[in-house]
Amino acid sequence: MAVSKEDEMRSLGWSLLGVCFVCGSMMAQFKTTVRSEPSVSESLVRQDNGGLLFGWFDPGKLTMRHSYSLSYQSFGSQGLALGVYTNSLAYQISDPLSLQMDVSVMHSPYNSFGDKFGKSLSGIYLSRAELRYKPSENTLFQIQFRQLPSSMLYSGYRNSYWGFDRFE
């Protein structure tokens, strides 16, 4: 039996049509999550909320304030100008426990007591370091360290010295 070229082409066409039909009716696997490569910005920005230093430090619990006070006092024929820049940091360690620090830079831009007196006032001071534990509304335990030159008691900074500038 001799098969003609026409019959051969027809059977090849039907075979291809059958393969296409069988392949098209097969069920494919559908993945619900597509694996995506991170973009450049995602790979540079840290996404975990563990905080810095192995989760011990959370920047969201840190508060920082800056203040500058400049005061002038006169004592008869003498005068004193005193400037104080203070950087105040507060960190809420846990709900009842907090740590606060004030670092002050003091300078005397003008005084009539002499350069030696002005230089004795100038400097950097850890004006307050405080650990506060407040377990209830009416209970407060605090440990505090202060380092201030005696002239700050007489300056405009004294309200901060006596503790009226708390982070609350």
Image (tube, rainbow, N blue to C red):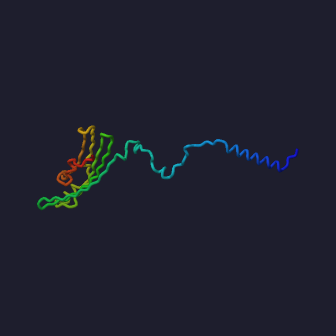
Q: Position of residue 84 (x, y in %)?
A: 24, 55
Horizontal and vertical percent position of residue 6: 83, 50
- The residue lying furthest to the left in this view is 76
| Quadrant of the image occupied by residue 80 | bottom left
Q: Would residue 75 appear left or right of 127 to someone viewing this image?
A: left
The residue sitting at 45% across, 47% down in the picture is 47
Residue located at (67% from left, 45% from top): 24
Q: Is residue 43 above or below residue 116?
A: above
Total marks placed: 0
Q: Quadrant of the N terminus?
A: top right
Residue closest to the eye, 122 or 65: 65
Viewer-closest of 55 and 128:
55
In the drawing, does residue 113 fall left or right of residue 142?
Answer: left
| Residue 27 in picture, x, y percent from top left | 64, 41
Q: Nearer the viewer, residue 40 or 118?
A: 40
x then y, percent, for residue 83:
23, 57
In the shown orientation, is residue 116 left or right of residue 59? left
Quadrant hosting residue 121: bottom left
Looking at the image, residue 61 sits to the left or right of residue 145; the answer is right
Depth check, front residue: 8 or 87: 8
